[in-house]
Image: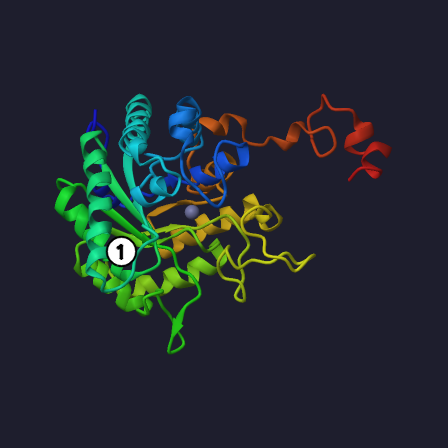
Amino acid sequence: MPGKVKGLMDRLHDGESVVIAEGYLYVFERRGYLQAGTAVPEVVLEYPEMVRLQYEEFYRAGSDVVLAFTYYAHREKLSLIDREADLEEMNRTALRMAREVADKTGSLMAGNICNSNIYVPNDPDITAKIKSMFKEQIEWAVEEGADFILAETFSDLGEALLALEAVKTYGKGLPVVVTMAWHKNEVNGRPATIDGVEICETFKQLEAAGADVLGLNCARGPTTMLPLMEEVKKCIKTPLAAIPVPYRTTKAEPNFQSLTDPLSGKRLFPEDLNAALCSRSDIKEFGRRCLELGIQVMGVCCGNECHYTRTLCETLGRKVPASRYSADMSKHYIFGTSEKLSTRYTSGEGKQHTA
Ligand SMILES: [Zn+2]
């Protein structure tokens, strides 16, 4: 039942960190249940138990939040694949299973809305369409018992403001986390949204419009997201969220869409991105920096898997269910120290020829 566990805002008020495991689209793309490019969560209807299991796995890895997999389960995407008739069932199924897993595990459940992919600034017809897309998804999330709404991956401030306004209007008072996907645009040498608004101004406007948590998600890896988060921190007082992709983005290629393969020079997105994956140590460093900067809501986005989420949680000093199987190298046959191990491998010729 919603509300029986400590709410998002109470946790943040008490100075706690909140971890959100994301990355469902890519998890299912890698496993062959979802098409890259199209990127519609059809798996929710085709293999619902796979989605339920993934919710549970992210819980085991330490996620505080079961994020309903309704990312891109919106009218524009469903119309792209001629499945608009399945829109409501797809949303409700994802939400219902998320609620069930959250109840079973004592987690929070979040409804999820995102970029519509049809946004054009100052176009009244498009604006009306986007508003109704947000409205229906928010109403389903409320009806299925979401504890808060995550509105994410907006690259235009105008669209993020529409999403925020929609949650304020139809969200029945649920807290709302708004995170921007920050790409490469600059205006007068300053990082800017695609609709040309400078970063500090962007977050001041979102704060003034009443977002409960603000930050960045997706698009950038930890090393190119954190410097922007430092800027955001200087501009607003709202609690902060940082949910990067687990890829080694660089100054020259700051988002994962622009990454190229150092060997071939070809674009890595989306099928070759594993050539640029973060290590677990990179994620550990990310968690450490979040703590240092006072970023309370954190997670890993597209490219995430359970091991990253577990690493992030353990960096916060937590022991999570999956910590039961966190590495114990003292029992490794080459690198171990246990007396039960053969010294031929821990210190003799076996070691010489392996390590
Ligand atoms: Zn993402």
Neighbourhood count class around disc 1 (C-alpha, 10 Å): few under 14, some 14–19, many 20 upward: many
Residue 258 picture location, percent across and down: 52, 59
Position of the N terminus, as image quadrant, is top left
Residue 212 visible to an observer of this rendering: no
Q: Residue at x 52, y 66 (%)?
A: 251
Residue 6 picture location, percent across and down: 23, 33
- In the picture of the structure, the residue carrying the numbered disc 1 is 160
Q: Residue at x 29, y 32 (%)?
A: 85
Quarter of the figure with residue 207: bottom left
Give the SS element for disc 1. helix
Instruction: Choose between 309 and 52: the one closer to the eye.
Output: 52
Residue 39 visible to an observer of this rendering: yes
Residue 199 picture location, percent across and down: 33, 66
Quarter of the figure with residue 201: bottom left
Instruction: Choose between 214 and 9: the one closer to the eye.
Output: 214
Instruction: Choose between 59 and 304: the one closer to the eye.
Output: 304
Q: Residue at x 34, y 41 (%)?
A: 79
Residue 296 picture location, percent across and down: 33, 48
Q: Amino acid at mark 1?
A: Ala
Position of the C terminus, as image quadrant, is top right
